[in-house]
Image (cartoon, rainbow, N blue to C red):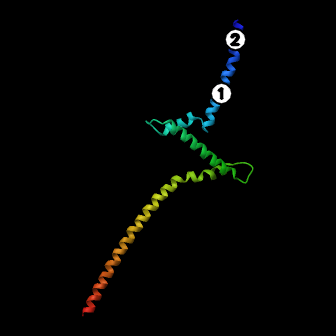
Amino acid sequence: MADEQVNEIATEEPSEVEETTENAAEEDETVPFPRARVVRLMKEEIKNKILRSEVKEAMNMWLGDLTRKLAKEMGSTQYASVSLADFQRATKPYDMIEDIVKDEQRLLLSVQKLKEDSEHIIRELNRFFTVLRGRKQEDDQL
């Protein structure tokens, strides 16, 4: 009888393990990356806040989409293997976003400075021509 129970337990354990593995596999198919790792990375940067589950899943899905886009770009290489140069080429637009934002701020400041300079020139020209008109009117009266 004890041998039968041991045999039953021995035969049940693999099926339970398979079910657990299948459940884990089903869960892994819903999101591209392990949730715990993505959440851990997010929590390293987001302190003293509660992350909602939809945010965790949305981040995971977005990372999966980004990975697909990068892989597609790297796959367009003309060579038989994908190299680090292909990776850098594919990620360059994303790495440049911070620089583009800084350039935008720099350009806006430059445009603002040009606008102020042009307004100053307009005031100076108006004053110059007002003086000329004033002299012209005086000459006409003489």
Q: Is residue 43 left or right of residue 118?
A: right
Compared to residue 65, the image places residue 12 above or below, namely above
For the residue labelled by badge 1, is the local secondary structure a helix, a strand or a loop?
helix
Q: Outermost residue toward the right?
A: 80
Q: Earlier in the sequence, mark 1 or mark 2?
A: 2
Q: Which mark is residue 21?
A: 1
> How packed is label 1: few (under 14 Cα within 10 Å), some, or many (20 or more)?
few
Q: Residue at x 65, y 27 (%)?
A: 21
Image quarter where the C terminus lies is bottom left
Q: Residue at x 66, y 21 (%)?
A: 16
Q: Which mark is residue 6?
A: 2
Q: Is residue 72 left or right of residue 42?
A: right
Identify which amino acid the numbered label 2 is placed on. Answer: Val
Q: Which mark is residue 1?
A: none
Q: Is residue 42 left or right of residue 135?
A: right
Q: Residue at x 40, y 68 (%)?
A: 115
Compared to residue 32, the image places residue 124 above or below, namely below
Compared to residue 35, the image places residue 19 above or below, namely above
* Spot occupied by residue 102 in the image (x, y as percentages of width and height): 48, 56
Q: Outermost residue toward the left?
A: 142
Q: Nearer the viewer, residue 98 or 141?
A: 141
Q: Outermost residue toward the bottom?
A: 142
* Spot occupied by residue 139 in the image (x, y as percentages of width and height): 27, 91
Q: Residue at x 71, y 12 (%)?
A: 7
* Spot occupied by residue 134 in the image (x, y as percentages of width and height): 28, 85
> How packed is label 2: few (under 14 Cα within 10 Å), some, or many (20 or more)?
few
Between the residue at mark 1 and the residue at mark 2, the CA separation in whole angstroms equals 23 Å
For the residue labelled by badge 2, is the local secondary structure a helix, a strand or a loop?
helix
Q: Is residue 105 left or right of residue 30?
A: left
Identify which amino acid the numbered label 1 is placed on. Answer: Thr
